[in-house]
Amino acid sequence: MTKPETPARAHPEPAEAPDGAGAEPPGSPAGAPPELRRRYTAADLAVFTREEARRFVPQGGGDPRSDAVLAWELLYRLEPELYDRLASAERLHPGVVSWLPRQVDQIAEVGAGTGRLTMELIGRGRRIVAAEPALPLRRILRRKLAAVDHGDRVEVIHGFFDQLPLPSDFADLVAACSAFTPSPAHGGEDGLAEMERVCRPGGCVAIIWPNHLDWLATRGYRYVSFPGPMSVEFASVHEALELAGIFYPQAAGEIQRRGSRKVPFEVIGINPPRDLAFKVLAG
Ligand SMILES: C[S@@+](CC[C@H](N)C(=O)[O-])C[C@H]1O[C@@H](n2cnc3c(N)ncnc32)[C@H](O)[C@@H]1O
């Protein structure tokens, strides 16, 4: 298994991950820049439902200004359209999508967000169930699905990695994109076991844009990566500069100098969404 040189930005980890499971160093691109963390305060944590608070602030308290994980979770709930603008610019490598099984019966996706992966799954399964805990993101995803052909193949539901309201052996493919981490709040051992429970024998569990590859490898996951240059593709130069000011402040100067809406991932300093870890369950 080859490790990416830089971690995926979209998988923040708590400062102290359990059993040494891959916490990112403070200030790494996997965290949240101060510009994002400053948007929220501890008072905003009241937006969490009880189920969310149990996972994201298990000890109570918490401060999004010092905790990158909380800042991202608040972004999903308080500024979901802003998050969607970012995710829409960070497109998956086409090789990742083509690698996934096609013409399958049922697919389950966990942590679907606003549908970066979900929209690609529409053509691959007869029925897709997309689980997402954050209500504002579910609303955006439903809006997008209503606007596309065959969007009605996708059912958007509430669910967490460690508690999926789906039967055992439900899906031929169970996938998560930029959402699963070894932290119990974002998957962990229970979440991985739950994804595998929902996957039928002979089916595939795929963790797309993974980090913590060693953690996944020790649990039987193999790694695939697709080569080639990749850029974050913003809608305009103006959009690139505005979003960089919040999410990639370290790259904002260079983005301004280049004056292009397409920004190579190396300029931003995050690992591109070109890879996945997968396991085919014993049949
Ligand atoms: C970086 S976003 C990725 C969203 C989408 N998959 C994408 O690629 O754009 C992470 C997602 O994981 C979801 N998430 C966070 N904790 C979760 C949990 N315990 N169970 C399921 N999803 C979770 C968030 O609500 C968010 O939608």
Image (cartoon, helix red, strand yellow):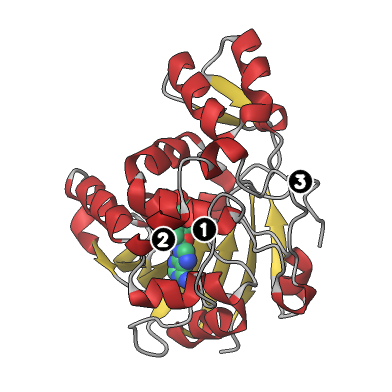
The N terminus, quarter of image: bottom right
Neighbour tally class for label 3: few under 14, some 14-19, many 20 plus, Cα within 10 Å: some
Q: Secondary structure at mark 3?
A: loop
The first of marks 2 and 3 along the sequence is 3
Q: Which residue has dot 2 on it?
A: 45
The residue pinned by badge 1 equals 70
Vertical arrangement, residue 92 with respect to residue 129, above or below: above
SS at badge 2 = helix
Q: Nearer the viewer, residue 150 or 72?
A: 72
Question: Is the CB of mark 3 within 8 Å of ligand 1?
Answer: no
Q: Quadrant of the C terminus?
A: bottom right
For marks 1 and 2, the one nearer the N-term is 2
- Dot 1 falls on a residue whose secondary structure is helix
Q: Percent position (x, y) of residue 240?
A: 50, 22
**Amino acid type indicated by mark 3:** Thr
132 lies above or below 32: below
Residue density around tag 2, few if under 14, some if 14–19, many if 20 or more, within 10 Å = many
Report whether 78 appears left or right of 197.
left
| C-alpha gap between disc 1 and disc 2 | 8 Å
The percent coordinates of residue 48 (x first, y second) are 36, 65
Tag 1 and tag 2, C-beta contact below 8 Å: yes
Q: Amino acid at mark 1?
A: Leu
State the residue position of label 3.
Answer: 6
Question: Distance between the Cα atoms at labels 3 and 1?
Answer: 22 Å
